[in-house]
Amino acid sequence: MNAKIQTRDDSTGQVEPLRKRQDGDLYARPAAIEDAIAGVMRLTKAEFIHLIEAEDSADSVPSECLLYFVRRPPFAADQAVLRVLFTAIRQRVLKAVPVPKRHIAGKKAENAIDLDIRDAVLGKFEEMLCKDRQEYVERLDFFECRFNAGVARLRSTARRDICKDATHLTPLVHDNESDEPHPEVERALSCITDSFDGPEADFLYRSKIHAAISSLPLDQRRVVELFLKDIPIDPQGTDTMTMVKILGCCEKTVRNRLKRAFARLAELLKEENA
Amino acid sequence: MMTPIDKDAVLDAFAAEPVHDRNTLERYVSEYPELAEELIDLAAELRLSAEFTGAEEGAISDPKLETAWENFLAAGPKPSVTTAAVDPFARFKGGAFATLAGKLDVPRSLLTAVRDRLVVPSSVPSGFVRRFAEATGTTVEAVRVYLAQDSQAPLGLAFKSDQKPSQQGRVTFRQLVENTEMGESQRLFLLRECEEHELT
């Protein structure tokens, strides 16, 4: 953390509490965020702007802290300061909506979906910020506690909405073409599970795998997600959670989705690696 | 049937979990089977967040920034038409003025200088402005606007002077505090406010 950020104990500023409640209790920011806010409160205007505009500001000013000041503009709501804050918080949203780099010729439609999702998330966030200037938007309190998780929530909603409209862009895979096993896909998927720490797990390689999964239709993406979580397909016991139970469809459907997903992933990874 | 608020609360709670492994997902899906698909979708997004957030270096192109900024400004509080015309001292003449000074715990002469806008507006500590706005039933914004207007030292008071009447330059709030007769504790309190204000 940047040296300029001091701890709450040294601060004379009062950090404004949140208003959203969960199970009757007020939301509380993590202590580290409260400390960061209290520390930033002690900066002069010049120091404040310098800190927010710094290239490495993400290391010293957490997004949750940045949002605090966007919602409660400091320095008598000085417009120049507010502009710096507004620009910075949009960058944080953009960076929290990854558009994985893909290098597959002729598949621009899928890249467009990623960009559409980013656009939709930024639009929704902007809408909340504008509304918050007129009446307190409690939804933003969550973002002040866990910014990236909040953006992930917006992303999830945006993807569901956008992918519903984009199903016609999904390439068809015929069952008879995907009957063969895809050990290379299983190997690739194992690289992005938490337990994997092999040499293949470099960022670029993992990025390709994440990007390929993201480009799958939602129903196939779900079975892959469950596969990544090591959840079995069929019932193996009454208490075991399985893909069949979770998705509420028959075993054959689940197997077909997984088969199609693996065939598509094999194709995508082949193109990526070509 | 689950209300939209419940659904949001469940998904928020899931998103806020420290880890999103098999156990966490199973726990939520068991408890909220009707949200299974949304929980899985969210788990996938959180996986992406963990991997990619902050991975893009440098600024990301933001072509809609200007429009968004204009919308943001337009949504903000607008100075009311009457703000410029508000005189926070209007209701505080004579005895009421003395009462106001007492309420703020400052000498009347200091408050007179503030009333006559003989103080550099930016040097007036936020704490004093806030207390003053509360005491006069106005807003911080209205007080700032009042202070920023041209000084209006009542020229009539200087009319009988040997010299041609003229407006004096403004002094800082600190200078005013330092040069006005008042109790030591009052002075220390106001100077501390000045110090905090100058630091920001």
Image (tube, grey):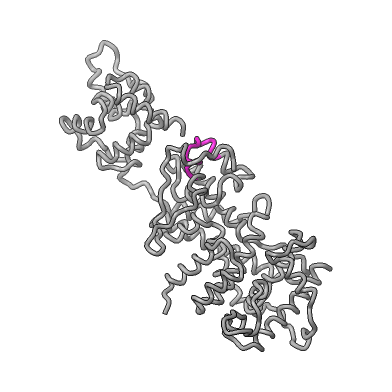
| Residue A260 percent coordinates (x, y) | 72, 81
Height in image: A29 above or below B175? below
Height in image: A148 above or below B137? below
Furthest residue in direction top, as rendered: B162
Viewer-side residue, A174 vs A223: A223
- Please report the bounds of the magenta region as a residue range: A37-49
| Residue A99 percent coordinates (x, y) | 66, 62
**Residue at the location (63% across, 57% down)?**
B53
**Residue at the location (37% across, 24% down)?**
B174
In the picture, measured across the screen, residue B91 lies left or right of residue B142, that is: left
Please tell me whether residue A45 belongs to the stretch shown in magenta. yes
Height in image: B182 above or below A170? above
| Residue A202 percent coordinates (x, y) | 76, 59
Furthest residue in direction left, as rendered: B95
In the picture, measured across the screen, residue B73 lies left or right of residue B50, that is: left
Viewer-side residue, B40 vs B156: B40
